[in-house]
Amino acid sequence: MNWARRKNALQEEAPKALVAVWECESVDCLGWMRKKFSLNENPKCPLCETKMKSGERMLST
């Protein structure tokens, strides 16, 4: 029990920021990727080969 309190005290929150991403348009797929790491201007989802749309996510930097 003491370890759990000490572990939580030692952990720091990672800073978060809005990051531009590509999100899969398919309802059944949860695929997404950072725009920074995309090589294409209009990429396809690497999981289901569906078009991707532009979006933003709150991610740890």
Image (spheres, rainbow, N blue to C red):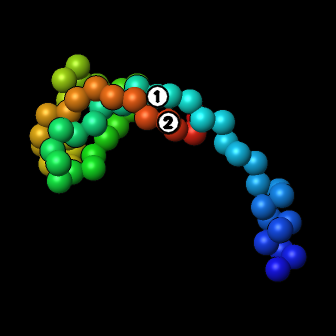
Q: Is mark 2 in CB contact (under 8 Å) with mark 1?
A: yes
Q: CA distance from mark 2 to mark 1?
A: 6 Å
- Residue at 83%, 74% (x, y): give it: 3
Q: Which residue is mark 2?
A: 58
Q: Is residue 7 above or below residue 61?
A: below
Residues 37 and 55: in front is 55
Examine the image and state in which quarter residue 42 appears.
Answer: top left
Q: Is residue 44 left or right of residue 13?
A: left
Q: Secondary structure at mark 1?
A: strand
x%, y% of residue 30?
A: 27, 50
Which quarter of the image is occupied by the N terminus? bottom right
Q: Nearer the viewer, mark 2 or mark 1?
A: 2
Q: Residues within 10 Å of mark 1 (few under 14, many from 20)?
A: some
x%, y% of residue 35?
A: 36, 26
Q: Amino acid at mark 1?
A: Val
Q: Is residue 42 above or below residue 52?
A: above
Examine the image and state in which quarter residue 41 appears.
Answer: top left
x%, y% of residue 50?
A: 12, 40
Q: Which residue is mark 1?
A: 19
- For residue 61, which numbered disc appears in the image? none
Which quarter of the image is occupied by the C terminus? top right
Q: Earlier in the sequence, mark 2 or mark 1?
A: 1
- Residue at 40%, 29% (x, y): give it: 56
Is residue 35 visible to us here?
A: yes
Q: Secondary structure at mark 2?
A: strand
Q: Amino acid at mark 2?
A: Met
Which residue occupies the extreme bottom position in the image? 1
x%, y% of residue 33?
A: 34, 37
